[in-house]
Image (cartoon, grey):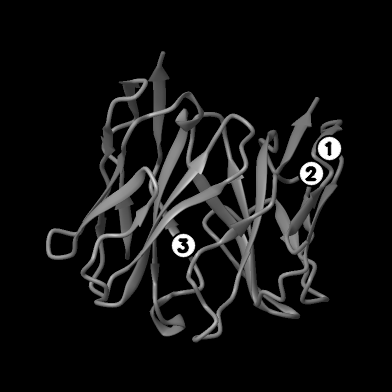
Amino acid sequence: AQTVTQSQPEMSVQEAETVTLSCTYDTSESDYYLFWYKQPPSRQMILVIRQEAYKQQNATENRFSVNFQKAAKSFSLKISDSQLGDAAMYFCAYRPLYIIQGAQKLVFGQGTRLTINP
Amino acid sequence: DGGITQSPKYLFRKEGQNVTLSCEQNLNHDAMYWYRQDPGQGLRLIYYSQIVNDFQKGDIAEGYSVSREKKESFPLTVTSAQKNPTAFYLCASTKLTSGENTGELFFGEGSRLTVL
């Protein structure tokens, strides 16, 4: 079964600094999606960034970027120039590409709580 | 605007009462999901549905029931058999058709159920 592991239950960073959240996953599939979701205190789940496994180029969305290492099954999220509004719970998630592989379900990690210190 | 609407946002019920949480989407998504989240915890899958009139149990289905009579709607009933129903409940949906599928789940704003 596919699993997603976030080994850092909590992280903190100074405002304007850079922080990296770790995520590893286990799968035997070669085609899949990886995601980082943000859950602020409002508890709304917000998609931060998406990576397709067939793309070698790391995804980037403004201050958010990933380091996708397919062979190592690692998918870390880097937040540059951290802002107070980045404080949230961050979830890493995996989803196979095809339904026959279980694409109807996302597998979530346990989350990392990020605190931004002013 | 397209999106997922959950209601009510907050719900208080007495122990032993059944409660139904509403989830409606106008995104023309195929699959819909219910997750439970306890304080400081991750998301646990309760039920999901890929198509109308069909649904599958997730990891923690005991004490819950669902229906999918319409593509847009996937209500969740928390029954009196659920031992610890106080939690935050999130509904989500996604496209399954290849070519239109960007992969991610879209989430509603959640419903907070408190059983007194």
- Residue A10 in percent (x, y) is at 35, 26
Q: Which amino acid, mark 1?
A: Gly
Q: Chain for mark 1?
A: B
Q: Where does label 1 land, which residue?
A: B16
Calculate the distance from the C-alpha at mark 1 to the C-alpha at mark 3. Answer: 32 Å
Residue at 37 percent across and 20 percent down: it is A15
Q: Which of disc 1 and disc 2 is earlier in sequence?
A: 1
Check disc 2: other Cα within 10 Å, few if <14, some if 14-19, many if 20+: some
Q: Where does label 3 land, which residue?
A: A106
Residue at 47 percent across and 28 percent down: it is A87
Asked if marks 2 and 3 fall on the same chain, the answer is no
- Residue A7 in percent (x, y) is at 26, 37
- Residue A22 in percent (x, y) is at 25, 42
Check disc 1: other Cα within 10 Å, few if <14, some if 14-19, many if 20+: few
**Front in this rendered view, residue B102 or A95:** B102
Q: Chain for mark 2?
A: B
- Secondary structure under tag 2 reads loop
Q: Left or right: B30 with respect to A110?
A: right
Quarter holding the C terminus of chain B is top right
**Front in this rendered view, residue B45 or B79:** B45
Asked if marks 2 and 1 fall on the same chain, the answer is yes
